[in-house]
Every structure is written in structure tokens, then in C-alpha cells.
Image (cartoon, helix red, strand yellow):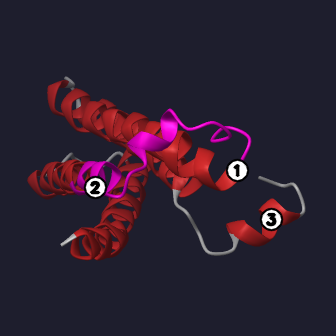
Amino acid sequence: MITGFLHMHSGLRWVALVLLVLTVVRSVSGWRGNTPFSEGQRKLGLFTMITLHIQLLVGLMVYMTRGWIGMLKAEGTMSNSYTRFFAVEHGSLMVLAIVLGTLGYSLSKRAADDATKHRKQAMYFGLALVLILAAIPWPFRQGFEQVGWF
């Protein structure tokens, strides 16, 4: 069961990334092109936010069941970049990114004009995308950690 949650969390990240990129690209093009904020754009933001929240719930299940929460009490967790990343950095950055994504949807929904709606979606979902890209445990990170880049 734990392995299933881990695979779901790993696979769902690609859905979340694709939706984030689509949301940011469409909102930036709508903002720059002065196009109306369509119902499709609103739904894209909604589906992106829902996917981020599902990813958070699955990630919390992985975090609790894999024992990462117990690593916070272990000595040496903060001095080891691998354990520190999974015990503290990954979860913290992802929660912050999901908060930004939620703000992007909520604030764009409440904005008065179409340009502001596009701008708020572009800014908040864009910041969420940057944080998520920084916090994903990419396979190449291990090579960079060995030379001191992470």
C-alpha cells in the first residue's frame, strides 16, 4: 500500500506539472493579449488547484507512512542533505506552492476585470510552478549534491 501511494505521488506530479504549465502559459498569453477570461481558463485553474490538493494529500500519506516525520527527531537529519530534503525542505516548499496555487485560483476568481484575473493566475501559479520545480527530487540532484550545488 505504501508503494502504491509513492507511485501515485510520483505519477501525479506529471499531471500537476502539465496543468501548472498550461495554466501559466494560457494566463500569461491572456494577460498580454488582453483576451477575455473564459470559463475554460477558470476551470483550468480549478483543476490545477484540485490536482495540487490531491497531490498534497497523497504526499502527506507518503510522508507519514515512510517515516520521514520521525526523522525530524533523529540526530544528524539536518546535516545530511538527503534526509533534510525529504524530512523538511520538500514538504515545506510544496505546502507553500500549494498555498500559492490556491491563492491564484481564489484571487483570480474574485478579481474585477479580465486582465487582473489573468495576471493573478499567472503570478501565483507561476510562483507555485517555480517552487514545485525547485522541490521535486529530480534524479540529477544527487550528482549536484556531491559537488556541493545543493
Q: Is residue 61 visible?
A: yes
Callout 3: SS: helix
Q: Quadrant of residue 18?
A: bottom left
- Residue 2 position, x and y percent, is 25, 69
Q: Residues within 10 Å of mark 3 (few under 14, many from 20)?
A: few
Query: In terms of sequence position, does the residue under pointer 3 or pointer 1 come before the other?
Result: 1
Q: Nearer the viewer, residue 97 or 47?
A: 97
- Residue 64 position, x and y percent, is 29, 48
Question: Marks 2 and 1: which is nearer the front?
Answer: 2
The residue located at (22%, 47%) in the rendering is 36
Q: Is residue 123 visible?
A: no
With respect to residue 96, does 41 lie above or below? Answer: below
With respect to residue 141, does 126 lie above or below? Answer: above
Report which residue position mark 3 lands on. 144
Q: Quadrant of residue 65?
A: bottom left
Q: Quadrant of residue 10?
A: bottom left
Which range of residues does the magenta coloring cover? 58-80
Q: Is residue 103 magenta?
A: no
Q: Nearer the viewer, residue 140 or 50?
A: 140
Q: Residues within 10 Å of mark 2 (few under 14, many from 20)?
A: some
Report which residue position mark 1 lands on. 81
Q: Is residue 64 magenta?
A: yes
Q: Is residue 150 left or right of residue 34?
A: right
C-alpha span from label 2 to label 1: 21 Å
Q: Quadrant of the N terminus?
A: bottom left
Q: Which mark is residue 65?
A: 2
